Image (spheres, coloured by chain):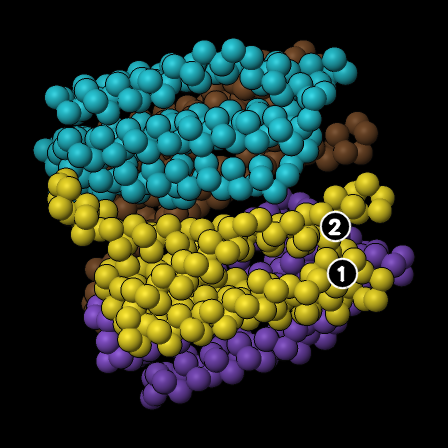
Chain colours: A yellow, B purple, C cyan, D brown
Amino acid sequence: MVLEMKIPEEPTLQAAAESAPGVFTYLLSFVYIGIYWNNHHHFFALVRHISGAVLWANLHLLSWLSSLPFTTAWMGESHFARLPVMIYGGDLLMCVIAWFIMQMTVVRAEGPNSVVPTAIGRDLKGKLSPFLYIAGILVSLLSPVLGVAIYTIVAVMWLVPDRRFERHAAALESGG
Amino acid sequence: MVLEMKIPEEPTLQAAAESAPGVFTYLLSFVYIGIYWNNHHHFFALVRHISGAVLWANLHLLSWLSSLPFTTAWMGESHFARLPVMIYGGDLLMCVIAWFIMQMTVVRAEGPNSVVPTAIGRDLKGKLSPFLYIAGILVSLLSPVLGVAIYTIVAVMWLVPDRRFERHAAALESGG
Amino acid sequence: MVLEMKIPEEPTLQAAAESAPGVFTYLLSFVYIGIYWNNHHHFFALVRHISGAVLWANLHLLSWLSSLPFTTAWMGESHFARLPVMIYGGDLLMCVIAWFIMQMTVVRAEGPNSVVPTAIGRDLKGKLSPFLYIAGILVSLLSPVLGVAIYTIVAVMWLVPDRRFERHAAALESGG
Amino acid sequence: MVLEMKIPEEPTLQAAAESAPGVFTYLLSFVYIGIYWNNHHHFFALVRHISGAVLWANLHLLSWLSSLPFTTAWMGESHFARLPVMIYGGDLLMCVIAWFIMQMTVVRAEGPNSVVPTAIGRDLKGKLSPFLYIAGILVSLLSPVLGVAIYTIVAVMWLVPDRRFERHAAALESGG
């Protein structure tokens, strides 16, 4: 998975400014991929049993994450045109849905004595995100830039590190 | 190995529709690479001895898998023209043949007491696939889209997870 | 993170010569990424505790390192035009700042008994680098080639391997 | 490091035939990278001590290996023009020289009781290769295709797996 960015065609400030939507979109996707990578790392530190279903659920998640470079490029190069912004939001929506499916598959593979369900907890941010993405997609019909703003708010919301998995991983290590 | 996809040139539904063959081909190759990655993971969980021949057989398999991005791009950009569809099928055929060679090399390296030959078992899907690919390649002479349909059927057939290796790996872990 | 280089358009010495700025920039970035990779390897050999903050600080560092392919390509293709040279220097400056932040986060996660602060020591080269980058950026206003020369001097300064972390890692291994 | 290949512009046999030099060059580089990857794997299975110098020697080797995608693309797209063929040979020559430097650095880091020098042995193929590359580069002045043929012969010579390191690794494992 390689995020790409078009470099400005001329070595001028004006050409750099025209690349601004591309640079912003690149950063937004970089942050999203970082969030998933980080939470994935903490989440699987708790997991003791991997089933074939978990591998497939992971691959499913990866398929939506690895579509981000393309939806990112399309949104950036179109300078936030309506359709690409909506499809980008749809990709983010599928990523979070695929994350839920992966979580459920892990919970089933782990069995009843796992620390994972407790670690997931109420998962307010996780439950809120799909509705925000859907809001962003619908708002893009009126104003794509506003849609991008909503996607950005979700990213910022997630940037606050998710200590749930980390705390439980530390507890596991220290024998608790 | 990086699967690439051309993003639509305009931010319109029409341009997105023209990208449909490319998107479909990308997904098909993504699924195929996922299948191989997944089965490879389960298969090598059973393997205890790696010889130089196994490394070379793996590299041989990798060479056909890593050709998929190119045959994929050609098939997608040509909107399922006959020659690229046949060559894509040929690549899939070589992948499955390379998988067989890799399996045989592992069996030889493992020696007589390995669980691997039992885990491979009758391998009906594995034995059927080459014939389906050959059928797809030949059918593409008449109708490339029908050929792509056959390649897709093989992918779906393999998407049903291959529990053979997984079951034996679990048995190994639990001391059986 | 994939550093790319444009290949010459014609198979002639003249076309190859025109690619010289691109090749030089590619090499400079390759060396910088190698320096960070190498020091990162030695540094984390000393680290015993990873917190979520360390993962984020690492991701932050990675974001500036993975921008190098783009700032590299822009600087190379513009044949050392002023603006891209200044932005390239800004990227190098952010890389070294992100390195400092990462170091601080690790020191905090490690706690009081860690060998890390002693290993970091006075860190003269680390403290000098940001000023040299800023000098390079400012000098580029007058002469971009001179700016590139300063960036190159910093790289050469760092190419002298940083034995601090290595020495302490060896000491740790041998029980000291 | 990503080897790339241009896909044919038209879905026709003629366009595919015009891509033949590109495909051949891609395969040749794939085999070379496979050879280095394979021997690197076997070689480092014997290594017990990594110094900073070894990391740098590895990075130096990597810099020449990771130039292969560019020299490959240039040679392939120029349809074996003289200059790119000579530069491709120069890249291969630098790869094998960098391998020697890496080997020497490892031998020094390993100290007197290592199995590595014995495993390297007389290294006839290694000593022959640089001369064959130089021959290929010089021959390309007269006939680039003949130069490519010589590079191919060296690759075939190395494809015969190098059992030296493998044999010693097996001996190490079994306590010998």
Q: Foreground: B65 or A126?
A: A126
For the point 32% across and 52% down, the residue is A24
Same-subunit check for callouts 2 and 1: yes
Query: Which quarter of the figure has residue A36?
Result: bottom right
Residue at disc 2, secondary structure: helix
User: Percent position (x, y) of residue D34?
Assistant: 48, 44
- Identify the residue position indicated by label 2 in the image: A168
Q: Residue furthest right?
A: B175
Three-letter amino acid code of the residue under disc 1: Thr
* Quadrant in the picture for the C terminus of chain B: bottom right
Tell me if C112 is positioned left or right of D58 in this view: right
User: Percent position (x, y) of residue A156?
Assistant: 46, 54
Q: What subunit carries mark 1?
A: A
Contact (CB < 8 A) between labels 2 and 1? yes
Residue D147 seen by the camera: no
User: Percent position (x, y) of residue A3?
Assistant: 38, 52
For the point 72% across and 71% down, the residue is B163
Query: Is residue B147 placed above or below A50 in the rendered structure?
Result: below
Q: Foreground: C71 or A171?
A: A171
Query: Is residue D39 placed above or below A49 in the rendered structure?
Result: above
Residue at disc 1, secondary structure: helix
